Image: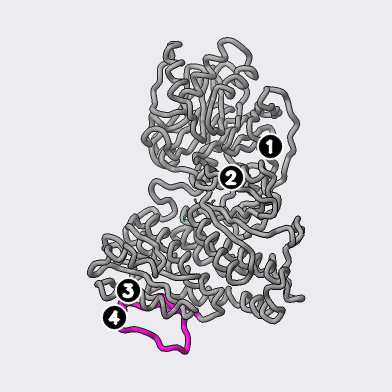
Amino acid sequence: MCGIIGISSNKSVSATIINSLKKLEYRGYDSAGLATVHNGMINEIKSEGRVDSLEKNFDLKNLEGNIGIGHVRWATHGVPNSINAHPHSSHNVSVVHNGIIENSTSLKKFLVNKGHTFKSQTDTEVIVHLITENLKITDLEEAITNTLKQLQGSFALGIIFKDIPNLIVGARRGSPLAVGYGPNENYLGSDSYALKSMTNKVTYLDDGEFCIIKKDQVLFFNEQGIKVNKKIFELSSEESSYDKGHYKHFMAKEIEEQPNTIKSGIKEYVDNFNKDINIFNFPWKIEEIKSIILIGCGTAYHSCLMAKYWFEELTNIDVGIDIASEFRYRKNRFKKDTLYIFVSQSGETADTYAALDICNKNNMKTCSVVNVIESSIARDSNFVLPIHCGPEIGVASTKAFLGQILVLYIFILKLSSLRNEINKNQYHKKINDLKTLPELIEKTLLHDNEIQAISSTFNEAKGSMFLGRGFSYPIALEGALKLKELSYVHAEGYPAGEMKHGPLALIEKGMPVVVLAPKDNYYKKTISNMQEVIARGAKVLLITNKSEDEVISENIWETIEVENTNHDLLPFLLTIPLQKLAYYSALKKGYDIDKPRNLAKSVTVE
Ligand code: F6R
């Protein structure tokens, strides 16, 4: 999952490429590089680390050229260093690549026998030499068509040539790629987000296609090398949301933005006048849907799990959930009356996209819950439920999680009403409760100083556990994921009732354990499980909701009380302290909060 940018212009491109690469760092940030063609030469600069280090290590004024490609890397083959950084070049060809070439070992053998020498440990370098080899025997279009046929795996490519110095080739199989149009220049980008600062007019390549980009013309070709016409889309512009404002980190800003996330979701879907929920243009009759399967990865998968609990509570529909990387390789039994829902913030996650693609190929009903509406997953779903939370830049998902569970909850309520599984009064009451949620989240966000104080205990421990039952279980998983990805401390989310079947052995004196026990139907059971860990020495942080009921405080290390609301909505509130706990833990350790090690925002490799 790397970021690609290419510019073909009538002026020097290196500074613009650098700026675009900075925007693309959410796709990978372990190394960066760029190459231009100038005066009959390919000039290449590469560096380990962030795009900043490219600027520090090289004088960009010396990197002239009106044609160029750039790349930010998230390592798959070969350690992150400057040799393995992209672009990779031969004497004539330079390539940037996102994806994995599965037959690189056999191709490398073939190319070495032909006299090619390799510098890096990457799979990408075989593409460079394969094109170089194919160009010896035929023209550009045929050489590209032949090369793509020889490659197995997934790729988005940007390619420039010393001997054909006026163009960039882009090619796509599996990994997304877009072309943008500007005045006297045209662009290539690994997604439309990369292009947004330069243009709002884009074309998306489909699988198997390639394109030739000159400053004043773009041509598209299919897998057979035959020219095809493509549609130009207009993008919405939200540039202003891409800065941190007065916050130290995007994550801090995105956590605080959550009341607005919920407000925009409610504005989009709730009809205040009729006390109803609007899901416009839903393409199927409700009777056509007998079961639902929700699919996602990471935090988005936790949203799916959350939705499962709500579906079961509010409807009688059969519901299943799946992790996209598992779903895509399993033998699935497709049924015409199943609705497949794909949850993804970026809309570009390779595993989720692949799962969607399998469903589309089997003519299933597909719907996506996404943030980026121009994304591949949104474009290729039959129906889209946008979450409208604005760009999420911090690698750890926060506001998108709340946005996803909000839209799923709203959809479930509507379905329940259409299926006559909820009475009118209850339906209206739940819609009214929903409208109070932004204010309740605002109040919950005020639990700041106490969470800051608590966070050091989690940093100093060998590990921690997050426990919950029922509606709180997905939130326990999410809390543990946030803590481990940001503060690099082992954290495990568990259904509280499962502890006695093994994990209880992990509990030792002083181990911090977060227990999510709102006063819902599971409260008493969770409290019993909490006592079991306390009895074994755990230091318990209890997160519950304010209520008239007796507050249990004996032997509890710390308690946080979120606001009170209807039980369906408590998961929204329980999430907030856990996001803050992860944020402050990482802050105390001085870690890079918006770009945790080894991760990327958009995971476009499988
Ligand atoms: C964790 C996190 C990831 C993503 C996952 C799916 O904080 O952000 O686990 O949720 O990579 O990404 P999307 O939602 O873009 O499909």
How crowded is the residue under tag 3: few (<14 C-alpha within 10 Å), some, or many (20+)? Answer: many
Q: Which residue is mark 1?
A: 181
Q: Distance from label 3 to label 4 (Cα)?
A: 8 Å
Comes first in the chain, label 3 or label 2: 2
Q: Which residue is mark 2?
A: 353
Q: Distance from label 4 to label 2 (Cα)?
A: 47 Å
User: In the image, residue 33 lies at what x, y percent?
Assistant: 46, 33
Q: Residue at x 47, y 68 (%)?
A: 575
In the rendered view, would you say 105 is above or below 59? above
User: In the image, residue 265 lies at what x, y percent?
Assistant: 64, 65
Q: Distance from label 1 to label 3 (Cα)?
A: 56 Å
The magenta-colored residue range is 543-563
Amino acid type, mark 1: Tyr
Element under label 2? helix
Amino acid type, mark 3: Val
In the rendered view, would you say 400 is above or below 358? below
Of 540 and 593, nearer the camera is 540
